[in-house]
Image: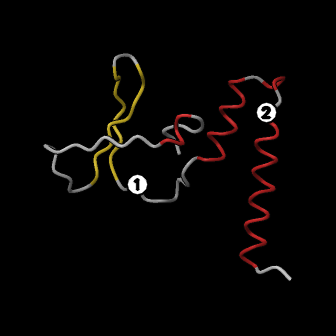
Amino acid sequence: MSSKENEIVIQHQKDLLEVFGSVLDERIGMKHSRYVIDDYFSADESIKPCCEAVPVSADGIYALWMTAEGADPNKRLLYLHGGGYILGSVRG
């Protein structure tokens, strides 16, 4: 018999297959596919933000300048999350 945690993981995998199965259908189009993926991976709006997000243009490319509460404004960290290269957006 599976544990409760295992059942949660299995259900999550089924949900992912349902979501991604639809976005792999070329007939629905890229715009709708991006919407579905963004919606699925978006952060829960009830979670208190850990930082301020300011929209900026990086040589014409939309980006967000993130500043954590209490952070030294004279120091910077560039973090490139590899998963973002293939899937997802700043909304997640």
Amino acid type at image mark 2: Leu
Residue 8: image location, x then y, percent: 74, 69
* Image height of 31 relative to 5, above or below: above
Q: Which part of the image, by quadrant, shows the N terminus?
A: bottom right
Residue drawn at the location 73% of the way across and 66% of the way down? 9
> Which x, y percent locates residue 16?
75, 50
Tag shown at residue 85:
none
Question: Where does residue 58 sit, x and y in percent of width and height?
Answer: 34, 23
SS at badge 1: loop
Image x and y of residue 88, in percent = 57, 39
Q: Nearer the viewer, residue 89 or 53?
A: 89
Query: For residue 81, what is the image quadrant?
Result: top left
Q: Amino acid at mark 1?
A: Pro
Q: Badge 1: how crowded within 10 Å, few (<14), some, or many (20+)?
A: few
For this orientation, the residue located farthest to the top is 60
Residue at (40% x, 54% y) in the render = 49
On the image, which quarter does residue 2 sit in?
bottom right
Q: Which residue is mark 1?
A: 49
Q: Is residue 51 above or below residue 66?
A: below
Q: Tell me the element at label 2.
A: loop
Drawn side of residue 77 relative to residue 10, left or right: left
The residue to which callout 2 is attached is 24
In the image, farthest residue toward the front: 82
Counting residues from the start of the chain, the first of labels 1 and 2 encountered is: 2
Residue 79 placement, left or right of 46 = left
Q: CA distance from mark 1 to mark 2?
A: 32 Å
